[in-house]
Amino acid sequence: MLAAARAWPRSSNGLAELAERLDHARIEIGTRQFWCVAAASVAVLLPLNWSWHVWGRQMPSSIALYIVAGSLFYFGLLRLLTGIRFSDVSHEARFVVISSMLLLILFLAFGRSNTYRLLFERFVPVGVRTPLFGFAYFATCSVVLRLAVPYLLLRFRLRQRPAEYGYVVRGGTRMRWVYLGLFVVMVPLVLWASALPEFQASYPQTRGIVSGTEASIRLFILYQVAYFMVFLSGESFWRGFMTFGLGRDLDVSALPWMVMMYSIGHYGKPILEVNASILAGFVLGYLALRHRSFFLGALLHWSIALTMDLAVLYQRGITWN
């Protein structure tokens, strides 16, 4: 076992006590080392993001290569800058890292709407809700691979209480004013981005709710329900399973790895959004560690996405029926 005290942030004493009680690899990483790892990880991630945007997406199975490369870069930087090896973290943390990578590869390779269009769309009778089926497939895969499977793994493989991984609502809302402030800050940025051609082409995530210059209110509500489940499952995966799985050993020094995987998970969206996810990942991950829950992060994420959808539809002059 390694040193017991965590050096940053000082206010995370509860995490250190929890780690001691559960006999984790309680690894001490100083403030300066943390910032070095974080800065080096971002310096590696930005070129990775641009390389995928320019040519990487044209390579078969490139997403798996980027996920593996991102993790190798992070643990290589961790070893180089702190001396901590992958084998130094607990068995639980190693299991979370490997299983998260595999689940992410499966989800990004087979869980998106293009897989539905390729394999299933031709068998579905055409109807008023048919355009939503591709997004429903995406939402279902998201819930299964990013929420249900990790939940089952931590309960029955790792034998941990879900609350230890942020699966809690009660008591997890005490920092709600911070999240509300983040939403207020994001609204002007969302309104600005909604006028950009890349975002106009990407949102809403399903074009099935729009016919000509009109959008269906009923279909939009169904779409938003599924959309919320996408964000709830995503936050449970990124800020729950991944952040707490490695963070109970490394505290906030686990965030650069999660952020690398999180940013790669945005591949296919506008490059501005891919790079913006780096800052969002750090902020939401840190907040989740502070108040031991990912629920408000899911609510914030969905609220911003809903605002983007409404702003894009408004920019396009869409009316409602």
Image (tube, rainbow, N blue to C red):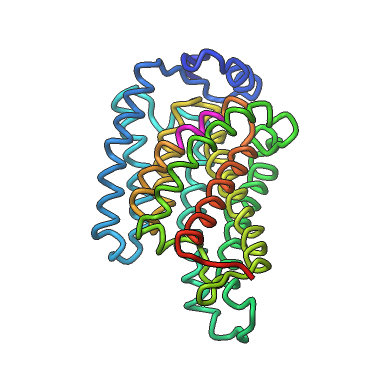
| The one of 182 and 279 positioned closer to us in this rendering | 182
Q: In percent of the image, x 52 and y 20: which residue is there?
A: 26
When the figure is inspected, residue 311 is found, relative to residue 220, above or below; the finding is above
Q: In percent of the image, x 24 and y 58: which residue is there?
A: 54
Q: Residue 74 appears at what percent x and percent y? A: 35, 36
Part of the protein shown in magenta: 281-288
* Res 22 visible: yes
| The one of 150 and 319 positioned closer to us in this rendering | 319
**In which quadrant of the rendered image does the C terminus lie?**
bottom right
| The one of 83 and 203 positioned closer to us in this rendering | 203
Q: Residue 242 appears at what percent x and percent y? A: 53, 40
Residue 164 within the magenta-colored segment of the rendering = no
Q: Residue 278 appears at what percent x and percent y? A: 40, 39
All told, the count of numbered labels is 0
* Res 288 visible: no
Q: Is residue 264 left or right of residue 313?
A: left
When the figure is inspected, residue 230 is found, relative to residue 15, above or below; the finding is below
When the figure is inspected, residue 135 is found, relative to residue 309, above or below; the finding is below
Dominant secondary-structure state across the stretch colored magenta: helix
Q: Is residue 122 left or right of residue 270?
A: right
Q: In percent of the image, x 45 and y 64: which residue is there?
A: 316
Q: Residue furthest right?
A: 170
Q: Is residue 90 left or right of residue 128?
A: left
Q: In percent of the image, x 59 and y 54: which residue is there?
A: 230
Q: Residue 173 appears at what percent x and percent y? A: 68, 31
